[in-house]
Amino acid sequence: MSEYLEIVIQADVQTKKNNYGQTKSGKRYKPTHIVETEKLALQQIPAEYFGMDLKHPGVEVFMEMPKKSWAMDQDGAWTTVLDYLVKAGVVHDDNIRSFNGPKYLHPVVEAERKKITITLMVATMPNSFITWLFTSRNVAKPTAVFALVRKVALPTFEMVRINARA
């Protein structure tokens, strides 16, 4: 199995907290457009990733979307995508007991369509640190930065961290 799993979701990801409906009795439900978006997103997860039941993977998230969508809650979109990964069985659960690897959430980049790229770092050790990395610089080629960080910086950091424990 590869050390990195990449999942690309191109869908109009809706945050749950803003879009769920409520019945007269007070129960919350998913409206049809939310259910359809979820189906579309699940179809984009590679079949070989279903049922992997990963625990404590590291996660890197890169979001692209039109400027008009920037009013959307970034952490809400991430939470919704994480729910998709749990539903597909890619990750065991999204609670701390099962999902306590490092997390890198990159700044949203302007694009014509919504696209969320998730890279799971399978070799993360349980009980590793939690990190939210926010950067405030705009770069000409954000995907190049993303690739550099994933291929060079993160493995180097992991080696330094392991050697520091030795």
Image (cartoon, rainbow, N blue to C red):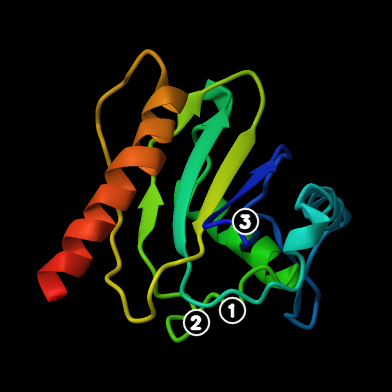
Residue reaching furthest to the bottom: 97
The disc at residue 17 is: none
Position of residue 113 in the picture relative to residue 156 (left or right): right
What is the spatial separation of the Cα atoms under label 3 and label 1, in whole angstroms?
12 Å
What is the spatial separation of the Cα atoms under label 1 and label 2, in whole angstroms?
6 Å
Q: 10 Å neighbourhood of mark 3: few (<14), some, or many (≥20)?
A: many
Instruction: Establish if 95 lies above or below 66.
Output: below
The disc at residue 93 is: 1
What is the spatial separation of the Cα atoms under label 3 and label 2, in whole angstroms?
16 Å
Amino acid tagged 2: Ser
Which residue is identified by label 3?
Answer: 81
Say which quadrant the C terminus sits in.
bottom left
- Helix, strand or loop for disc 1: loop
Q: Looking at the image, do the residues carrying marks 1 and 2 touch, with CB atoms under 8 Å apart?
A: yes
- Residue pictured at 84% horizontal, 51% vertical: 43
- Residue pictured at 32% horizontal, 40% vertical: 152
Q: 10 Å neighbourhood of mark 2: few (<14), some, or many (≥20)?
A: some
Position of residue 16 in the picture relative to residue 157 (left or right): right
Q: Earlier in the sequence, mark 3 or mark 2?
A: 3
Which residue is identified by label 2?
Answer: 98
